[in-house]
Amino acid sequence: MTDPNNNVRSVLESLVHDGGEIGVQVAAYLDGKLVIDAWAGLADEASQSPVDGGTLFTAFSISKGITATCIHILADRGLIDYDAPIAHYWPEFAAGGKARVTIRHALTHRAGIPQDPPGFDISMMCDWDAVCQAVSDLEPLWEPGTRIHYHALTYGWMLGEVVRRVDGRSIQRFLQEEVCQSLGITDLYFGAPPGAVRRIATLRNTPGLAESLSRIGIPLNHPLRDSAATFNRQDVRRATIPGAGAIVNARSLARHYAMLAGGGALEGVRLLSPERIAIAGAPQPEEPDMIDLRWWTGHGLGYTLGGGPGPRKRLPHAMGYEGVGTIGFADPSCGFAFAFQKNLLDMSSSEMDSATLVTEVTMEALGIV
């Protein structure tokens, strides 16, 4: 009988050997048990340091799903109403015509402020108070709720500051105390602690990354334009960037999603009610003429949904998030949770090819659909 973990590891080794990836890592849970834990390649090309199970990766937009989980915990406790204005919890946010922007708008990229604040740079990105003040001063580019446009970074600052205003703790601390400590997750951070920084894989851009970012309107001087250089910086790795900067390994990301796959509970610890999981994973209404993007993945409340092209095409009930070729998700319908991490940054049309292949091989090895 073949070992599912060996099957997956062989595919990872092939991806690296063929030059398609530098370092890769995958973990999967089925019915609350870690069943796949595999890796291959290099965490750092200069030193030839190998990836292992504890190697940490920058999660990019996967961070948004983690942020959403924090919001849903507070909603489950009756402390947040999705249809309440953000300004109800964060009064300063009402400035500039944003008084009617709701939590639901933020979770579904309809808040109308996808743009960066004036003067945005790496220094501001790493300064929580400064960037939240700047975001609260933004004026919507259109009437909130009427258009969908990806809020690459402002998503995290809007919702992260709501967590702080409602709970009193930073989202960094909330994540550690309410999610990680509760579930026994050891390596999931908004802002990597000093002891973890040395384990973070070094990022490298593919040659076409800058061109891809240019096509979606990222200006030359933007911190994301050279994403590898920006997110390899120690100050950025230590910063709280809930829209794009989580630091995590596949084991910890998959464990987070195993809780969602288990209907809100894992190993006897319940963080969310089954009803809340159903609410969070329900497709949000959207009209084609609302979507102001060259691409769009259907959303629930803060999670992208399965059933479309890519890694989750055979999993219509899946909920999670992608991030520059990586992915983490849960499928409560079959108790499956999955995480794929890598350090080669690609935003071309083939961005999700590795993730799709590894997801399919994992599902086949585990006998899922």
Image (cartoon, grey):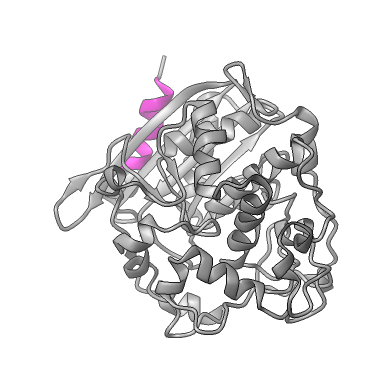
In the picture, residue 156 is in which quadrant?
bottom right
Q: Is residue 309 visible?
A: no
| Residue numbers of the magenta segment | 3-13
Residue at image point 49% right, 62% down? 350
Q: List x then y, in percent, for residue 23.
A: 31, 49
In the picture, residue 188 is in which quadrant?
top left
Farthest left residue in view: 47
Q: List x then y, in percent, for residue 347.
A: 48, 66
- Measured along the vertical axis of the image, is residue 52 above or below residue 169? above
Decide whether residue 48 is among the magenta residues.
Answer: no
Comparing 178 with 148, the one in front is 178
Give the position of the C terminus as an image quadrant: top right
- Measured along the vertical axis of the image, is residue 369 above or below residue 288? above
Q: List x then y, in percent, for residue 312.
A: 62, 44
- With 68 as the anchor, is 206 left or right in this view? left
Q: Is residue 153 visible?
A: yes
Residue at image point 79% right, 66% down? 101
Decide whether residue 9 is among the magenta residues.
Answer: yes
- Measured along the vertical axis of the image, is residue 257 above or below residue 63? above
Residue at image point 38% right, 41% down? 25
